Image: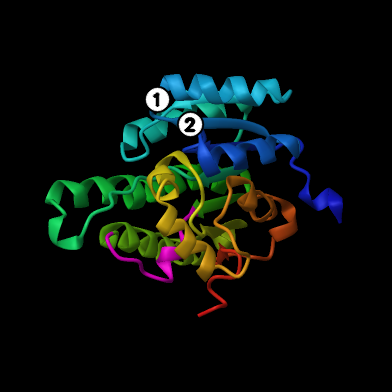
Amino acid sequence: MIKQFRMDGRVAVVTGGTSGIGLAIAKALADAGARVVISGRSQERGDEALEALRADGLDVGFLSCDVGDAGSVSALIGEVVSSHGGLHVLVNSAAINIVKPALDHAPEDVDALLASNVRGAFLCAQTAAKVMVDQGGGKIVLLTSMVAERAVPNQAVYVATKGAVVSLTRALALEWAPHDIQVNALGPQLTKTPMTGGLFANPEKMVEVHARTPAGRAGAPEDLTGAALFLCSSASDYLTGQHIIVDGGRGAAG
């Protein structure tokens, strides 16, 4: 059974892989034997991530990419295929959030959230799938959020984008199952990352989160790595179109 979780010889791209959940997943895939390329918009953050990964003895590459830009996504996937001979796994972790009351959202906020979180997820999945169809299969994991199932205030558009990615996952899974491409979504509870640092700095908010979570704590990026490795490996070859939420039991608590 353990062999099913090995990733030896597989090429994986992790967008948004320079920090937080994406970085933790990239490390887990590399630990399991995959040849991993992380991407992000910042070369500086990419260099920092590579330094951290290589300090752990992992040979991981970095390519800059703006997932909302079709040309940038095409260049990313094209360079990976050219350099490594194929693409077996895509993990799309790139996303942004804008926290403010719905009444205060400007049209530019909506456009930015949709471009990164929905357009980006689709472009990355579509571009990767074109390679996977030709090579006879692959794995696509789209990062969502617990809020796709349980809305929270002051994040209305972000909630909507994550709900859209869940629906996108199911639709793509149906279309691409005949090509042996499994498409699944992975949704974390509130997790400590650079994007959520403001919430973790609010003691009252964290007391509330801990009280509502049966596990008694918020998430850490490493909490997602086991589920991610499962979805990226051959252990999940008969699982597609699913939304797996890693939330310390919060959803079960009602």
The answer to whether residue 201 is visible is yes
In-image side of 37 versus 156 (left or right): right
Foreground pick, 195 / 23: 195
* Quadrant of image for the N terminus: bottom right
Magenta region: which residues? Answer: 143-154
Residue at screen point 58% across, 49% down: 220
Foreground pick, 179 / 8: 8
**Mark 2 sits on what residue?**
39
User: Would you say the magenta stretch is mainly helix, strand or loop?
Assistant: loop
Where is residue 214? Give x, y as percent: 60, 70
Residue at screen point 41% across, 71% down: 150
Where is residue 168? Give x, y as percent: 41, 62
Q: Label 1, secondary structure: give it.
A: loop
Q: How many marks?
A: 2
**Residue 235 highlighted magenta (yes or no):** no
**Mark 1 sits on what residue?**
42
- The kind of residue tagged 2 is Ser
Where is residue 235? Give x, y as percent: 75, 57
